[in-house]
Image (tube, rainbow, N blue to C red):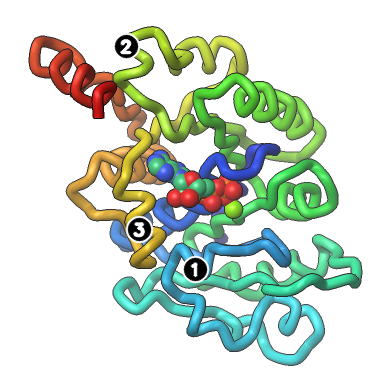
Amino acid sequence: MARRIVLTSGKGGVGKTTICANLGYCMARMGLNVLMLDLDMGLNNLDVVMGMENKVVYDIIDVIEGKCRAKQALIQDFFLPKLYLLPSIHCFYNKKIEWESINKILEELDFMFDYILIDCPAGIEAGFVRAVSLAQEAIIVSTPHISSVRDSDKVFSILNNYDLNSKYLVVNRARGDLILSGDMISIDTIVDYMKTELLGVIPDDDVISCQLMAGGSVYSESEAYQAFEMIANSIHFGVKKIYDCTKRYRGFVGSIRRTLKRKI
Ligand code: ADP
Ligand code: MG
């Protein structure tokens, strides 16, 4: 049976979709069968990030309405045959979508996958409830900005009302240079504030913006990729290793890097 993990945050634009796509890639590269489920109905962009937008024939609503079978709606990644996407609807859909009808679809697909990664919409309304109700585990994504930390903390409390086995925190867009200079809240401060288990830290990395332009995974030599790989290993093997975003800004060379980054 597949492990179902939802990526949520409350706030939009913190990196849920980015993390969902890149974790999917890392896990599939590790030889795991992964389904990414886009539940950001209407505002979805997981297919765009994955470079699969032009391959969408059927979406999840077509499956719910019986226009096709669940398997027919799946899109297989071009390079990684173990990685699939179940796309969300692109336009506004005014009928109510029950989480139970999506659950039925997932039950049908469950045997094919090791992991089902669920990309949750922003907010804490119906879309959030639907996505979280389908999951067994949750990754709460926060950036090191106070508004994001507060929203993620609220979401964390709301998640206590759901039947989840585990809840983890991922801090995205961490800037090691700013953390060292005291201009960005530290990872420890966020963990203390949220009182939750830290699953990973992802640096703010330009390769992620480039990925969006090209579609597909981030460059495997990049810092961001190393961070995604650590998270995937932690989830699957329980090997807990957190990416240290301050490492390259420490010491003499690090201080030069920091100064240059500030000036450019
Ligand atoms: P969400 O799904 O939470 O709304 P997205 O994953 O769409 O957020 O990310 C919002 C924007 O932030 C995107 O343009 C993405 O490229 C960028 N982004 C996300 N994570 C990072 C990162 N670690 N470094 C640089 N840019 C990032
Ligand atoms: Mg998103």
Q: Is residue 249 shown above or below 240?
A: above
Kindly identify which residue carries mark 1: 48
Q: Position of residue 114 (x, y in %)?
A: 48, 60
Q: Is residue 151 found left or right of 57 in the rendered image?
A: right
Residue beneath the point at 24% across and 54% down: 219
Q: Is residue 180 above or below residue 102?
A: above
Task: Give the labeled residue for mark 3.
Answer: 211
Report helix, strand or loop for mark 3. helix
Farthest residue, direction right: 95
Q: Quadrant of the C terminus?
A: top left
Closer to the chain start, of discs 2 and 1, is: 1
Amino acid type, mark 1: Val
Q: Earlier in the sequence, mark 2 or mark 3?
A: 2
In whole angstroms, how far apart are the C-alphas of marks 2 and 1? 35 Å
- In the displayed structure, would residue 55 be above or below residue 106? below
Residue labelled with disc 2 = 180
